Image: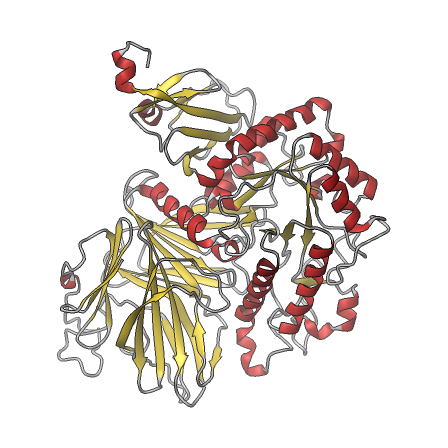
Amino acid sequence: MIFFQSKTNTFYLQGKNVSYVFRKDEYGFLNHLYFGKKVACGEDLSFVYRPCDRGFSPNFDGAENRSFSLDTMPNEYPGAGLGDYRRPAVMVRTRDGARQTDFRYIDHSIETNAGAKGLPHVRGGETLCVRLRDDRYALTLELYYTVWDDSDAVVRRAALRNDGNDSEHVLNLCSFSIDLPDADYQSLRLSGRPCSERAPVWQDCAPGICELSSGQRGSSSHYLNPFLALKHKNTDETQGEVYGFQLVYSGSFSLSAEYTQYGGLRVRGGIDPLDFDWLLQSGEKFETPESVLVYSDGGLSGMSHCFHSLCRKHLMNPDFAFRARPVLVNSWEAVYFDFDEKKLFRLIELAARAGMDMFVLDDGWFTCRNDDNGGLGDWEEDFSKLPCGLKGISEKCRSLNLSFGLWFEPEMVSENSKLFRTHPEWCLKNPERGFVRGRNQIVLDFCNPQVVDYVYGKMENIIDKNGISYVKWDMNRYLADLYSPYLPPERQSEVQHRYVLGVYELASRLNRRFPDLLMEGCSGGGGRFDAGMLNYFPQIWTSDNTDAFARAQIQYGTSFCYPPSAMTAHVSVCPNHQTGRMSGLDARYAVASSCIFGYELDLTKLSQSELDQIKEQVTAYKRDADLVLNGDFYRLSEGDVYAFAQVSCDKSRAYVTGITGLKQANDKFRFLKIYGLDCAKMYRVRETGQTMSGRVLESIGLPLPQAEGDFFPICYHLDGQPSSIKEASRRGEKI
């Protein structure tokens, strides 16, 4: 619900359990007042802002006295050049070369949330649009806020419209900015590198600026994820206050928390302003990506649940968000580039016998593709490997009641390709310099609509002609040559954002053309795992690292803001191809089955007992898949034991998975506390036959057996019993 109190000029945005409050002051500036636990609409919170004369905080022109300074105000969307020395949310270089803007309130309206054109956006909710204007330069700033009755999230974005006759340069336009009244927080970022993504890093806020940026990679990146959380020091998984901030964006981003001189904290986020300069011509509007702001007083789990719920209900494609996903086998780690039709047919037959739903042909199916040095861009079937073509593979799958999936890397081109020889100008490249190559690949210029049209035509034809029901969309390098031959010189600082808009356009067109096509995002694993891609791809390959213990760590970090139904996880071969580590088939299953599940190994090299075990795993996963899609996810432990719980919404069932680390001699007895259960309900542990109350499972925990070697699997099912603790006690049952 959105409410405006005209008497105090205050806006109240009400979610399920939260309130977001700001006001228009007597000068037309927006003062941020509150974001936290729900308060009553209409309650006067203007006392939060207390004007004060601070000697070195200047006064804007028109201020009645020295106590009115933007430098001391909690600002809702700060500009530049009017005396606020903190980082601005908007920076414009105007036609006269100045960087000073003065945006004042003009009006507001309640709207349907349509999202920004060409950008991913959340669905539904009630949206407030507040309009501000800089009359000197005829610039109109629009601030959008969306809330839902069933969510504790506030989604924000901004837009800047040029109503003047001259062009202006947008140097920075944040998706959001918020001034929190104190700075006694620990910040959480998700950091990593290829094959080791999204490790949680905690840091105390201190004077200065804590900034997260993907740099000039042109992608949300393996290095830092577009997510930031702030918690008080006593906050843990189940209790305490925490704020979460997430960008619905896949390009170069920036998130920052600025510890200010008077003990507050300014949090901002949006497109990375480094080398960003958008030429805004007369009559044009520039719109930012969306941002998700979450408050929880239920600890880190409460924050995660809010992000997970919003993603599943309002961001993911609704046709797939709650639909059972296919259990598949992917050919990559099974055969890499070295395969023929006979080999693939055998893999398909074994997948069908194991009860799987899909076979996915990964890289290597097109001409000039016996390694990763050629073939990208042409997408022509290699009939020397596949005499019957992709159609023959598809028909083989259908004959065994399997669907067929296919790998693409649509954003790249190889120099050894017809496309490159025909259209070298379709690549990102400085005309005065040579190519910067990554994996011997060159980036196609997705700023150019002709390039997007070409790639779409290729993909549409292959998908349509061959009965493809799943696409794995890969991106195996970052941008480097930040120059588009399509754009004029004065627009070269727009390349990174325009490139991402081109990616979104292609994904959106494929979604519209093939509404039943399941697309999975991938970027060397987890290099573009973000909320923006999840708007088009209901699942993303979580990491190229498929080692069970390493994956448990990666999935742990990823879960802070992304639901397990967005993470794909496969059982792969041992020794693991990334770490060389050995772990049992049951341990690999325990970790992978907490997410969207599949296999990535050569079934033809497994023993019959291993194939039988895989068949049992497939059957078991399908029984539990609804918990992955619909359940509440809880992180139970990290470190030498990683464990997770998926709890049904009615708390009648739970699926507990995980893995131990290295075996220690004479190790301590371990108990795994299970969160999210009904404390008054009795639960039977299917694997041990024990019956325990939800209270005991939460307070003491599930006793774990002594690990038999390294990387021991944790896999338990908890089934709620008809009787409560009181009923069981009354009958004298053991509880």
- The residue shown at (69%, 36%) is 601
Nearest to the observer: residue 469 or residue 673: 469
User: Is 24 drawn above or below residue 311 in the view shown?
Assistant: below
Q: Does residue 91 lie above or below 316 as drawn?
A: below
Residue 461 image offset from top left, x and y in percent? 72, 60
- Determine if residue 358 is in view: yes
Residue 570, image quadrant: top right
**So how many labels did they put on this image?**
0
Q: Is residue 594 above or below residue 531?
A: above
x 62%, y 73%: residue: 449
Horizontally, residue 601 falls left or right of residue 42, namely right
- Give the residue at x 34% y 43%: 302
User: Would you say 539 lies left or right of 605 here?
Assistant: left
Please tell me in which quadrant of the rendered image residue 603 appears: top right
Q: Nearer the viewer, residue 681 or 85?
A: 681
- Residue positioned 18% across, 83% down in the render: 62
The quadrant of the rendering that contains the C terminus is top left
